[in-house]
Image (spheres, helix red, strand yellow):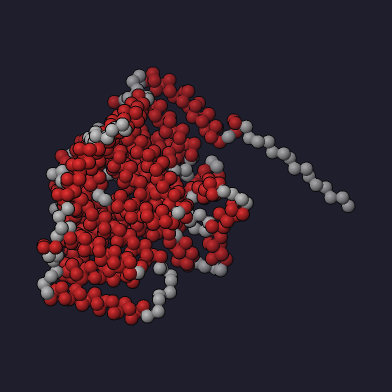
């Protein structure tokens, strides 16, 4: 009996008109053809129409007055927010008093002990050297104040971020709900929400801790969700086949597989919490941040650096210790570990007791080494010789001027020249091409909200600075991250440099940047690039290193070169991490561009800083809300949705 076989029909390649991107553009073109003449006829000018704006100054002033009038009598403050404030104060004070009671010798010994048992003798020596350096710089007491504040703030940030990330990682619906919340928490500049926080909690430690949690929790939440959602499906299916419950699958498969992202989230949370030390000092946090802020107010770079170095050292120590502790999770303890712990603990207690008996709890004044004067002389030399004294290529002032003239000015003027409705169409096209119609609608509404708030032109000025800074950051960051992922030696050499760049307080960047580049938008962009670069490099390298080795081995077996493996295997498989790097780059650039308002960046940054300085809730919050809208729009334009990835919608 003959077997009938159907001849397969040849699939014709899709034409240009059937391509999803082309279809979307055709729909947008049709809408533009209908709506553009109507908009041009109704509003002839290209700027945002005044009749479409909403004045929020009156309701915001009313809200500010209500908070001030009811802060001491309303049940919300007395029975809830008051208890939160008291709990924060008690926790920070308890940690601070415990550190002072142990003394400088005891803190150094205990820290070195933890580092030794976590990662070995080299990290222990480095930890001891870091704490001794804080004392030598004359910053022991401020370091303990900052350490106490950061211990409570980081613990709260990690707890909040992990819970939010757990919810977003296990539920698609919660992921969609929490995404704009995390965007708002991380994109809203610190200066914008410091004022309402101070109105509620007053100047002091509680306001500083809350501001730090709002700023530092989103990276933990994002990376936790990324790790849980990108877990190997084959492993999860194997666990399901064994009859594991949802809780068992989470504890035995999802969380262990997401260990890399969890550790990176902890690292980013620590770094961002410490970077808030200076900003929190504006509202009475004290510690190292207060020393930096006072030094910068008097343009004393040396004193600012003396207080900034301990912040960097704290970040490096916490980064190394937490990273090593996470790497050892699940490993069997070495033999005789309990005995070693006991002996080492007795030794640390003996050191602390000896310091207390000898009344040497405080760092001796005679052991302080001053670095402010030589640093200030070095800054003066750089200003004299590099600002305008470099032959042929020109000084840094010339570079800043050319960057402003050739990049920032044309970009700003071009954005402000475009009619407002054309800007919305461009945003809609970009967002819809990489996502769904919901993505485009969200981006357009976010951009339209900026016009409704009445800050259209300043927002486009800020957008031009952000776009320039993000472009430079991504070019340098991706190239450096790829190099770090392909070379272990380069990664080890680069790691301390990234730590220093990312943990140095944002204000500290501004003084040397202004000394080298002058005042204006260029120094704000330069500081933003330096601050955002480490996160982009770290996330890029992490994503490339976590590519499945089997995929790389398969590519090598087919004769692929190193460059082909990178382009055709590693970069496509690391796409979620690269997109997250773009997102974090945008967020961090926005944060520093706003602070750049202090050095002539202008635009929304100036409005935010002015609002905080003058206690003007309306000006500060409106500018802050516009920055959130900018961040939300950029996030939607640069982050493809999962629906498009899965279905091609």
Nearer to me, 282 or 536: 536
**Left or right of 203 in this view: 224:** right
**In the rendered image, the vertical position of residue 391 relative to residue 474, given as above or below:** above
> Can you tell which quarter of the image residue 630 is in?
top left
Q: Residue at x 11, y 63 (%)?
A: 366
Give the x, y percent position of residue 629: 34, 39
Residue 421 in view here: yes
Give the x, y percent position of residue 255: 44, 63
Give the x, y percent position of residue 94: 19, 66
**In the rendered image, the vertical position of residue 125 relative to residue 427, given as above or below:** below
Q: Quadrant of the C terminus?
A: top right
> Can you tell which quarter of the image residue 50 is in?
top left
Residue 161 in view here: no
Q: Residue at x 21, y 39 (%)?
A: 383
**Left or right of 596 in this view: 586:** right
Q: Residue at x 31, y 33 (%)?
A: 393
**In the rendered image, the vertical position of residue 618 relative to residue 559, given as above or below:** above
Give the x, y percent position of residue 450: 32, 34
Nearer to me, 467 or 511: 511
Going by the picture, which residue comes out furthest to the right?
A: 1
> Can you tell which quarter of the image residue 439 is in?
top left
Q: Residue at x 25, y 38 (%)?
A: 386
**In the rendered image, the vertical position of residue 420 relative to residue 109, given as above or below:** above
Badge count: 0
**Left or right of 207 in this view: 156:** right
């Amino acid at each position: 009996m003959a077997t009938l076989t159907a001849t397969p029909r040849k699939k014709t390649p899709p034409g240009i008109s059937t391509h999803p991107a082309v279809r979307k553009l055709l729909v947008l073109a049709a809408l533009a053809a209908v709506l553009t003449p109507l908009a041009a006829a109704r509003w002839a000018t290209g700027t945002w129409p005044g009749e479409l704006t909403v004045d929020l100054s009156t309701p915001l002033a009313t809200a500010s007055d209500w908070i001030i009038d009811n802060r001491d009598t309303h049940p919300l403050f007395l029975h809830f927010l008051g208890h939160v404030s008291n709990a924060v104060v008690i926790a920070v004070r308890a940690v601070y008093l415990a550190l002072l009671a142990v003394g400088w010798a005891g803190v150094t010994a205990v820290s070195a002990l933890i580092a030794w048992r976590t990662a070995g003798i080299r990290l222990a020596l480095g930890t001891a050297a870091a704490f001794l350096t804080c004392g030598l710089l004359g910053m022991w007491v401020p370091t303990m104040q900052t350490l106490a504040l950061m211990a409570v703030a980081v613990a709260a940030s990690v707890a909040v971020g992990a819970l939010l990330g757990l919810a977003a990682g296990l539920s698609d619906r919660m992921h969609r709900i929490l995404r704009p919340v995390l965007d708002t928490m991380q994109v809203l500049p610190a200066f914008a929400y410091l004022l309402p926080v101070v109105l509620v909690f007053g100047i002091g430690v509680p306001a500083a801790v809350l501001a730090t949690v709002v700023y530092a929790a989103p990276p933990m939440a994002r990376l936790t969700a990324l790790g849980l959602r990108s877990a190997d499906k084959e492993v999860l299916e194997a666990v399901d086949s064994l009859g594991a419950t949802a809780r068992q699958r989470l504890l035995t498969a999802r969380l262990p597989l997401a260990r890399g992202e969890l550790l990176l989230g902890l690292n980013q949370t620590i770094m961002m919490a410490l970077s808030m030390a200076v900003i929190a000092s504006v509202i009475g946090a004290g510690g190292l941040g207060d020393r930096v802020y006072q030094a910068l107010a008097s343009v004393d770079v040396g004193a600012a650096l003396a207080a900034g170095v301990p912040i960097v050292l704290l970040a490096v120590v916490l980064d190394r210790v937490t990273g090593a502790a996470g790497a050892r999770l699940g490993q069997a303890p070495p033999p005789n570990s309990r005995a070693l712990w006991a002996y080492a603990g007795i030794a640390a207690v003996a050191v602390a007791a000896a310091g207390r008996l000898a009344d040497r709890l405080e760092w001796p004044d005679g052991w302080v080494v001053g670095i402010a004067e030589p640093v200030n002389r070095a800054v003066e030399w750089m200003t004299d010789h590099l600002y305008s004294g470099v032959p042929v290529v020109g000084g840094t002032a010339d570079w800043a001027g050319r960057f402003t003239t050739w990049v920032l000015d044309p970009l700003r003027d071009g954005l402000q020249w475009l009619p407002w409705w054309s800007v919305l169409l461009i945003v809609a096209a970009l967002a819809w091409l990489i996502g769904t119609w919901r993505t485009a609608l969200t981006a357009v509404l976010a951009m339209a909200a900026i016009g409704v708030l009445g800050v259209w032109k300043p927002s486009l000025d800020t957008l031009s600075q952000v776009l320039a800074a993000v472009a430079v950051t991504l070019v340098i960051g991706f190239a450096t991250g790829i190099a770090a992922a392909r070379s272990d030696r380069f990664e080890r050499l680069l790691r301390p440099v990234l730590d220093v760049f990312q943990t140095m307080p944002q204000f500290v960047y501004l003084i040397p940047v202004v000394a080298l580049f002058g005042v204006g938008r260029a120094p704000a962009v330069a500081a933003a690039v330096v601050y955002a670069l480490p996160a982009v490099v770290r996330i890029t390298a992490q994503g490339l290193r976590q590519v499945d080795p089997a995929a790389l081995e398969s590519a090598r077996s087919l004769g692929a070169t190193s460059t082909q493996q990178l382009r055709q295997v590693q970069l496509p498989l690391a796409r979620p991490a690269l997109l997250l790097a773009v997102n974090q780059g945008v967020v961090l650039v926005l944060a520093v561009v706003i602070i750049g308002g202090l050095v002539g960046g202008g635009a929304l940054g100036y409005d935010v800083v002015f609002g905080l300085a003058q206690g003007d809730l309306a000006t500060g919050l409106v500018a802050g809300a516009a920055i959130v809208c900018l961040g939300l729009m950029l996030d939607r334009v640069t982050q493809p949705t999962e629906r498009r990835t899965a279905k091609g919608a």
